[in-house]
Structure formats: structure tokens, C-alpha cells
């Protein structure tokens, strides 16, 4: 059975809401299991083996990934190959202009991950239209695998 993993780190719940909406969008299209989990609940091995993958993290500090859980996890993926045909990146931010997402897309691409589009960055808490964009991202990710 195919497996989609939607892995996130969320401090305020915004990125978790986005992860859940991505799963909602993927569910009608995806022909297998969808696992939505916090980054501290998964292994790099499981993530790399997933048939479809979405990673989510809000901007922290000076527009960087969360440094105690998500950053070390991304470092574990460096030099590895993902089974997923495309990897979706998503998250929320409060200040700046979303540079952390552009940096993350560039970094994951340089690491050899096939990143889907430019990532989905939402300013502050996701509202209905943002959650709809998340559902569309989930649908698109599920249909590309």
C-alpha cells in the first residue's frame, strides 16, 4: 500500500492546521495511507521511504527553521534520496516576507529533493482561503505520485 507522510513542527498550532488541511486535500485522491505526524514522532528512514512527502515548519528567529527538532531532522536527510516523486514544503510566518521558505526550497533542492513548486507560506494563522490552498497542495501532491 502506498504511504503519504505529512511531517511538521508547530509551536502555535498554525503549521499543524496546515498539515491537517493538506491531508484533507490528498485523501480523496491518494490510494493509500496518509500519516500526519509531528517531526518528533517519525524517523528519517520512514520519511525517505514514503511514496509522497510534505514537510512543514514555521519561520523562527531570523526566518530560519525551528532549531531543536526540525533543523536537526532536515540535516539527517542531507545526502539521502527520497522515494517520493515530489516533496511539498509548507509553513507559516509572522514577520519578514517569507524568505525562510525560499531558503528552505533552495536548500532542499540543493540536497537533491524534488521540491514541488515554491512551497506554501502562510502569513500568521491560516484563514479559510489559506486552508483551501493547503487542500489544493495536498490534492496536487497526491495526484503527482
Image: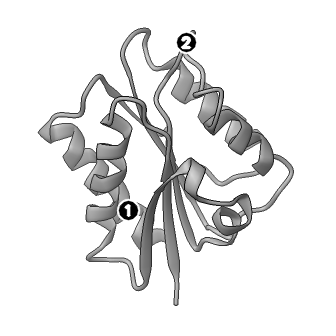
Q: Nearer the viewer, residue 40 or 120?
A: 40
Q: Which residue was labeled with disc 2?
A: 61
Residue 100, quarter of picture: top right
Q: Residue at x 70, y 44 (%)?
A: 73
Q: Does residue 68 appear to the left or right of 33 in the view shown?
A: right
Give me the disc on residue 67. Answer: none
The answer to whether one can see residue 62 in this image is: yes
Q: Nearer the viewer, residue 108 or 66?
A: 66
Q: Residue at x 68, y 60 (%)?
A: 43
How far across and down, in percent of the image, does residue 27 sit? 30, 73
The vertical placement of 2 against 116, above or below, is: below
How far across and down, in percent of the image, does residue 82 sit? 71, 63
Could you tell me which secondary element the residue under label 2 belongs to?
loop
Mark 1 nearby-residue class (10 Å; few <14, some 14–19, many ≥20): some
The vertical placement of 18 against 62, above or below, is: below
Q: Nearer the viewer, residue 88 or 116?
A: 88
Q: Nearer the viewer, mark 2 or mark 1?
A: 2
**CA–CA distance in space, label 2 to label 1:** 31 Å
How far across and down, in percent of the image, does residue 18 sit? 32, 45
Could you tell me which secondary element the residue under label 1 belongs to?
helix
Residue 46, quarter of picture: bottom right
Q: Residue at x 23, y 38 (%)?
A: 130
Give me the disc on residue 140. Answer: 1
**Which residue is farthest bottom?**
1
Q: Residue at x 39, y 10 (%)?
A: 95
How far across and down, in percent of the image, does residue 103 sit? 62, 26
The vertical placement of 115 against 92, above or below, is: below
Amino acid at each position: 500500500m502506498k504511504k503519504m507522510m505529512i511531517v511538521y513542527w508547530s509551536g502555535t498550532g498554525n503549521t499543524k492546521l496546515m498539515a491537517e488541511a493538506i491531508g484533507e486535500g490528498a485523501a480523496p485522491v491518494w490510494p493509500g495511507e496518509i500519516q500526519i505526524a509531528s517531526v518528533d514522532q517519525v524517523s528519517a528512514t520512514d520519511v525517505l521511504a514514503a511514496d509522497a512527502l510534505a514537510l512543514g515548519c514555521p519561520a523562527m528567529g531570523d526566518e530560519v527553521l525551528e532549531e531543536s527538532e526540525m533543523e536537526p531532522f532536515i540535516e539527517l536527510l542531507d545526502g539521502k534520496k527520497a522515494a517520493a516523486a515530489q516533496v511539498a514544503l509548507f509553513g507559516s510566518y509572522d514577520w519578514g516576507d517569507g524568505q525562510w521558505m525560499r531558503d528552505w526550497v533552495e536548500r532542499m533542492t540543493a540536497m537533491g529533493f524534488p521540491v514541488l513548486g515554491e512551497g506554501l507560506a502562510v502569513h500568521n494563522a491560516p484563514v479559510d482561503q489559506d486552508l483551501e490552498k493547503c487542500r489544493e497542495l495536498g490534492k496536487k501532491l497526491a495526484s503527482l505520485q
